[in-house]
Amino acid sequence: MRHRDGHEILVIKNASVVRDEDGKIIGIVETVTDLTELDNARRRAEDATRQLQKMHHLGNIIGKSSNMQQVYAAIKAAASSTATILIQGESGTGKELVAGAIHYNSKLSKKPLVTVNCSALSESLLESELFGHVEGAFTGAIRDRMGRFEEANNGTIFLDEIGELSPFIQVKLLRVIQEREIERVGDSKRRKVDIRIIAATNKDTYDLVRKGVFREDLYYRLKVFPIHIPPLRERKEDIPLLIDHFIHTHNLKTGKDIRSVSREAMRIIMDYHWPGNVRELENAVEHAFVLCNRDQIDLSDLPVEIRELGYHPIPPSTGPAPRGKARPRPELSRDRLLEQLDACHWNKAEVARRVGLSRTAIWKYMKKWKIPLQKQIGHAKGPGV
């Protein structure tokens, strides 16, 4: 409707018929409600959601934990400088994503970002890949070839798995960092390169230095500004955000309409150790998408290693047993074990947690009472099954 001041406002209109005692229509009551405030509240909520998403995302890096907020701050600081960066973190934590976020948030964002995996090639092939070669430098070098350092000129080169470099390549890399110049394999001509170097490793580089595997001078040249990415087990509050992101991504890929994860499945996910970090979590969601034909991912849709290892059973009492007295062992009958197996969807780790025994003890009882490890249709509670 048009307001008396001239601007349009959102309204909702309701009308009701008024009848007399005989059911005859005698009039209509109409109400008009101004929805301006409600619309404004909706807009404020949408703005808040967008701000929250922006706060918890940087590029494709997702997290709201204090650990990840520190990583975001480090990325922004690194992006505003041209210093050499060393990214350290376990496999699957997203080191390449961090390198990309630094580059694309820097003044070099319009320039090339060249990625090289230093562990994927032998020493001779990696030398040619990084520095290029001239015709006739070795068998098969039928023409001049530009290396990755030259391709990244005026931009950024990302050297992944830097801890795998041989001593020979380490020496050549040190010269690039110091002199900002390269020589192609088989050539004596020096070529200037203007590049920003970002390196990454999943190893303890300082430990490699102490062992004499990695050059100390190169280590200090690379770690001008170090960034440590925490493993997923140290930022578990980010897991629901990551799962929502992966569900949205795979819905778009598969055309499915999965909305969430069941409470039981989420409990297992939150308890799991995630040795493969974010990459393993994404793979687990993709695995669930293959099996799930509902709108919610359930425990049975998760990979078996996550279902089986999700719980780390805790003894019922952590205090020392009184001297001369053994701690009483929880009583468990065959019928009770079968009931618990059914209740826990045959997840032995969960059964162990509930009854206060180790998972090994559960397996021994199942073997003793001839209970199959996996549920069988029509299993009976009598002896010998």
Image (cartoon, helix red, strand yellow):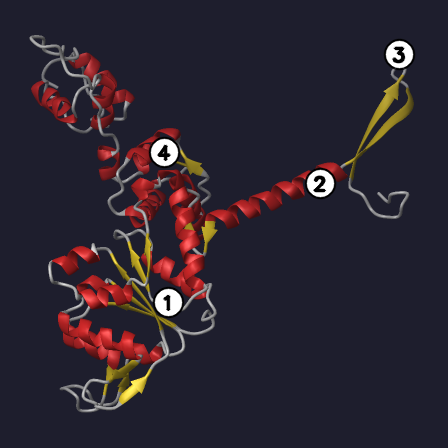
Residue toward you, 275 or 360:
275
> How far apart, in angstroms, are the residues tagged by discs 2 and 3?
40 Å
**Which residue carries the number 4 mark?**
266
Name the quarter where the N terminus is drawn: top right
Q: Tell me, yes or no, whether the two marked residues, 3 and 4, touch with CB atoms within 8 Å.
A: no
**Which residue carries the number 2 mark?**
39
Residue located 34% across and 33% down the image: 265
Q: Tell me, yes or no, whether the two marked residues, 1 and 4, touch with CB atoms within 8 Å.
A: no
**Above or below — where is 147 with respect to 234?**
below
- Disc 2 marks which amino acid? Asp
> How far apart, in angstroms, are the residues tagged by discs 1 and 3?
86 Å
- How crowded pointer 1 is (Cα within 10 Å; few <14, some 14-19, many 20+) is rated as some
**Which residue carries the number 3 mark?**
21
Residue located 16% across and 55% down the image: 207
**Above or below — where is 16 with respect to 175?**
above
Which percent across, then down, holds residue 239?
38, 41
Which percent across, then down, holds residue 145?
27, 85
Q: Quadrant of residue 22?
A: top right
Which numbered circle lies on residue 150? none
